Image: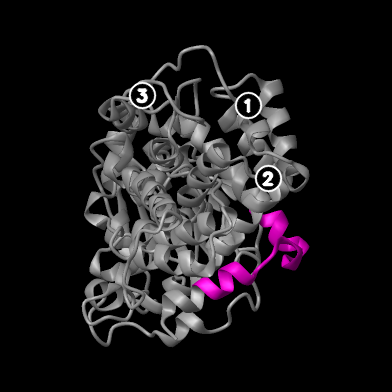
Amino acid sequence: MKLARHFAERITALDYADLPAEAVYWSKVAVMDTLGVMLAGSLEEAPHIVEDVLGLSGGGDCLIVGGNHRAGPLDAALINGTAAHVLDFDNTAAHMGGHVSAVMVPALLAAAEAFDVSGRDLLLGHTVGYEVGARIGQTVNFYHTELGWHPTWTIGVFAVTAACASMLHLTTDETEMALAMATSLAGGTKSNFGTMTKSLHAGSCARNGLQAVLLARKGFTANPDAFEHKQGFFNVFNGKGNYDAAKATAHWADPLDIVVPGASYKLYPCCYSTHAAIEAALNIVKQHGKLDPKKIARVESHTADVRLMHTDRPAPNSELDAKFSVQYCVLRALIDGKVVMEHFENEAYREAVILETLPRVQAIPLQGMAFGKEDPFNALVKVTLSDGCTLESAVDFPLGRTSANPVAFADLQAKFENCAGRVLPAATAQAAAQCIDGLDTLANVRDLMALIVQSAPVQIRRSA
């Protein structure tokens, strides 16, 4: 059986009643977390440039988050998906190897508004899409990401397609066509990390996956052999012999990937590959207090080669670039005792104390960490002070990295209210969080989106 058909049969066979309580919980958390960072991201310049280029006339059923403009589902998915990822504060999936909910949730919300969908159908769609993304991710990674593909789009497009096909109740044949079509709608290279284009990957992925579903339900066709074909997805994106197709069909929903290992949730608004090092630096601060930058002689931040490929940035040259500089993020943690959104705004990376101290921070490959090891997110931070004293901390498994070391729900809700509160009144943000908590009882997702409509114009934060 061809892979598109294999997935299609399983997607259409799974019902909401089949979901364990843990899957429902984590899908609710994903919707809350993604909508929060999407609202905060709606203040950034990138999604507004995308909206301007589209030249929207205001027609459509779907809310462009952060204001009261509306658009068709495809345009809303593109703009909101860009907003969801522009802060790099959204969740990631270990097995998919990229940002999973920032691509699915914008597409699901847009389609839900356009087609009057219940909260349960949305939660089911998110769970199913997560599963498909994980299975394909395990098939092609780590070779896929080492080549320079950005799995958030290249693999995420199948998660979006599966999620929307499930939510909109496509038939097995239609779902098969949509997945096959999505092989031609994948893209995104890691060379654009640290720029607006990285967030465009998420927006384009959201749009393209939903487009495949809407075309398939109208009878549009694709090659059912589009994954395995000699010029199909696997061979084109990985090359012959550089993927393991058996992993795509193994262990479907046993357990559901959204439950085990589950998503990773961010406490810091920057690339997840910096988070273990940030946590190690914060452990030093907890033990010794915030460090006086004048007394720092040297900082060594040790992380895996696969992480340094995109985070070894000793002199970031923009706010987005700073989100991918492990040197900058570790230094902020050491001298400020926190890493927050304000550290990536208003040219904070150019503060005099940063420019003076940053050359003394080095990013070093973690010894004993083989390139390509699964999930190498551990880190070691060593600080040498001017008096010769040495401080160090190691983190093997950062907080929030999968469901095995989860962030407390209260902290995730606080993150949502903080992010959403940049756009919404505090009471509205709290009401939206409560609505998401009851998403399984919501007859129409439009009710959630109606809560977050804002009549006041958004004050766009221009990128440095």
Question: Who comes first in sequence, dot 2 or dot 1?
Answer: 2
Q: Amino acid at mark 1?
A: Ala
Q: Amino acid at mark 3?
A: Asn
Q: Residues within 10 Å of mark 2 (few under 14, many from 20)?
A: many
Instruction: Report if the CB atoms under discs 3 and 2 are less than 8 Å apart.
Output: no
State the image coordinates of residue 153 (x, y, percent, origin top left).
Answer: 35, 56
15 part of magenta stretch:
yes
Span shown in magenta: 8-27
What residue is disc 1 on? Answer: 450
420 part of magenta stretch:
no
Q: In screen coordinates, is 24 left or right of 289?
A: right
Residue at mark 3 to residue at mark 2: CA–CA distance? 40 Å
Is label 2 in a helix, a strand or a loop?
A: loop
Residue at mark 2 to residue at mark 1: CA–CA distance? 14 Å
- Write down the quadrant of residue 416 in the picture: top right
Q: In screen coordinates, is 182 left or right of 92?
A: left
Q: Residue at x 50, y 82 (%)?
A: 249
Is label 3 in a helix, a strand or a loop?
A: loop
Question: Who comes first in sequence, dot 1 or dot 3?
Answer: 3
State the image coordinates of residue 5 (x, y, percent, origin top left).
Answer: 46, 77
Q: Main secondary structure of the magenta part?
A: helix
Q: Amino acid at mark 2?
A: Ser
Residue 403 vs 121, above or below: the answer is below
